[in-house]
Amino acid sequence: MSYIRIGDDQQPWPAQDESPLQRFKLLARQAATVAVDLVFPPHCVGCERVGSFLCSHCLSATTPAEDRSAPGFDELRACVEYEGGIRAAIHALKYERQVRMVRPLGELLAGMVEDAGWPIDLVMAVPLHSTRLHERGYNQAGLLGRFLAQRMGREFDPAALRRIRATESQVNLTMHERRDNVAGAFVADAGIVCGKRVLVIDDVLTTGATLGACAEALRAAGAAQVFGAAVAGAVYSGETVSPA
Ligand SMILES: [Zn+2]
C-alpha cells in the first residue's frame, strides 16, 4: 500500500473508488494547502488559536462519548461527543475539503481503538454513495480508516464493504426511518472478510443505523468479529444533528 508524503503531513490516498481526476484534484488541493500554510501559520478550526489545525485546548475540552451499541457489533464506540472543536474539525473535513483534519481526528480514533484493545485483522470504512463521492471527491470516513490502519499497522481494504443502493440523507429521518433507509444498502465481500475480525470506521455516529447496516452485511459475509468506531457520537434529538 502506498501513500503520498507532502511535507511532514502524511496524507493517505482517498479510500474509495476515486477517479484519476479526483485523485489529482485532492493532491493539488493538498499541495496548495501546504503552500498556504507556509505563508499563513495554521489556526485551530475550533478556537482560532495559532499553531495547529486542532489545538490541545480544544482536544482537552472534549467530553467522552456515551456508551453505544448497535445490533451486529461485538463493540461499538465513539471517541467524544460531537461538539466544540471536534464538531468544527469534522465539519471542515466533510464540507470544506480540509483533509488535513484527518491527522488530528485519526490520532484521536487511534488512541481510543488502542485503549479498547480489540483484536483487529482488517480495517474498513462506511462507504459513501457514489453521487456524494463524486461531489466531495473523497470519502472522509475512508481517509480516517486508512490513517488509522496505517497507524496501527493493520490492513485497510476499501473493497471489503460496498454501498449497493443509493439512500436518502439520514437527516430529518426518525430513528425507525433511518434503519429502514439503510437496511440492505451495503454488501460485504466474503472473500475478503470471512473469518476476519474487522473494524468499521465512520466519522459521526448518531443512531448507529448506518453502522448497524454495515455490521449486518459483514456478519452475512462471515466476519468472525465486528467492531465499530467513530470519531464523535452525536445525540439523536429527532431533528437534524448530523448528516449520517
Ligand atoms: Zn482550539
Image (cartoon, rainbow, N blue to C red):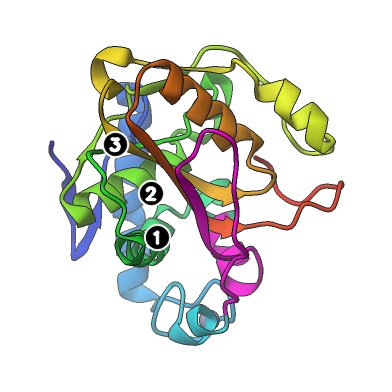
- Position of 204 compared to 218: left or right? right
Which of the two discs, 1 and 2, labels the residue nearer the N terminus?
A: 1
Tell which of 29 and 51 is nearer to you.
51
Q: Residue 184: image x %, image y %?
A: 60, 15
Task: Give me the disc on residue 197.
Answer: 3
Q: Viewer-nearest of labels 1 and 3?
A: 3
> Given the image, on which type of amino acid does mark 2 rest?
Leu
- Identify which residue, 181 or 6, lies in the foreground: 181
* Separation of residues labelled 1 and 3 (CA atoms): 18 Å
Camera sees residue 105: yes
Using residue 95 as the reference point, say whether residue 30 is left or right of it.
left
* Circle 3 crowding by C-alpha within 10 Å: few under 14, some 14–19, many from 20: some
Q: Quadrant of residue 82?
A: bottom right
Q: Position of residue 185 (x, y in %)?
A: 58, 17
Residue type highlighted by circle 1: Leu
Q: Which one is earlier in the sequence, the residue at label 2 or at label 3?
A: 2
Query: Looking at the image, which is closer to me, 181 or 22?
Result: 181
Report the residue marked by disc 2: 144
Quick check: is 187 in the magenta stretch?
no
Residue at the spot of label 1: 109
- Please give the range of residues in magenta: 62-90
**Residue at the spot 33% in from the left edge and 67% down from the top edge:** 115
Disc 2 versus disc 3: distance between alpha carbons?
19 Å
The mark lying in front, picked from 2 and 3, is 3
